[in-house]
Amino acid sequence: MADPALIAELERAAGGMAIPFFVEVNHDELVEPIRLVLDEADYFFEGETWYKSAFDIAPPADNDAPPETAFRFPNIDRRRTAKLTEINGPMSVSFRLFHASWFNLHKEPRVVKAGKTPVAAMEVYDLQLIDASGSPTEVKGRLIGIDYRSEAVPARRGVQSIFPGAFYS
């Protein structure tokens, strides 16, 4: 659940709170995930470097269809992002928002303050990036949420190979 103070700050016209927005794009065919942060500096967080980026996400439409939106980010590392356009199938995308107070904003790359363990103010998982295309300057695609209503029932079966904890001998 999202932090109510964060939601109120995001809804203000000109909030004074810095809120790093982390996004991770992953797929089995990628050597390592693409990690971006919407900020003016790189971050070293959870043992990984998150690269500054000016990515753009349009708000999803509020209708009866599954959530879908456009996602675009600069082609900062052409060797890695070129692979995105060659991948068959959807890529998983996750987002996390943190209060900037968890990070030392005076270091480059930015790091977690000593003695702090950041807790995400909001997290979104299980989005899928589809129809990825790239140019020398940007990568773009569509982000969709999983629509469990359109799957055959039952969507997931509790068989022993998938859910061994439900089976005791």
Image (cartoon, rainbow, N blue to C red):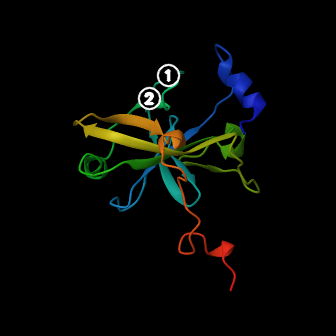
Q: Position of residue 153 (x, y in %)?
A: 53, 50
Identify the residue position indicated by label 1 in the image: 61
Residue that protrudes farthest toward the bottom in the picture: 169
What amino acid is found at the position of numbered circle 1 in the picture? Ala
Q: Position of residue 81 (x, y in %)?
A: 30, 47
Q: Find the distance from the CA under tag 1 to the CA under tag 2.
A: 7 Å
In front of the other: 3 or 115:
3
Could you tell me which residue is drawn at 39 percent across and 49 percent down? Answer: 91
What amino acid is found at the position of numbered circle 2 in the picture? Thr
Q: Position of residue 94 (x, y in %)?
A: 52, 46
Q: Is residue 20 above or below residue 60?
A: below
First in residue order: circle 1 vs circle 2: 1
User: Callout 2 environment at 10 Å: few (<14), some (14 to 19), or many (20+)?
Assistant: some
User: Callout 1 environment at 10 Å: few (<14), some (14 to 19), or many (20+)?
Assistant: few
- Location of residue 121 (image quadrant): top right
Q: Position of residue 24 (x, y in %)?
A: 48, 48
Could you tell me which residue is drawn at 50 percent across and 24 percent down? Answer: 59
Residue 57 seen in the figure:
yes
Q: Secondary structure at mark 2?
A: strand
- Location of residue 13 (image quadrant): top right
Identify the residue position indicated by label 2 in the image: 69
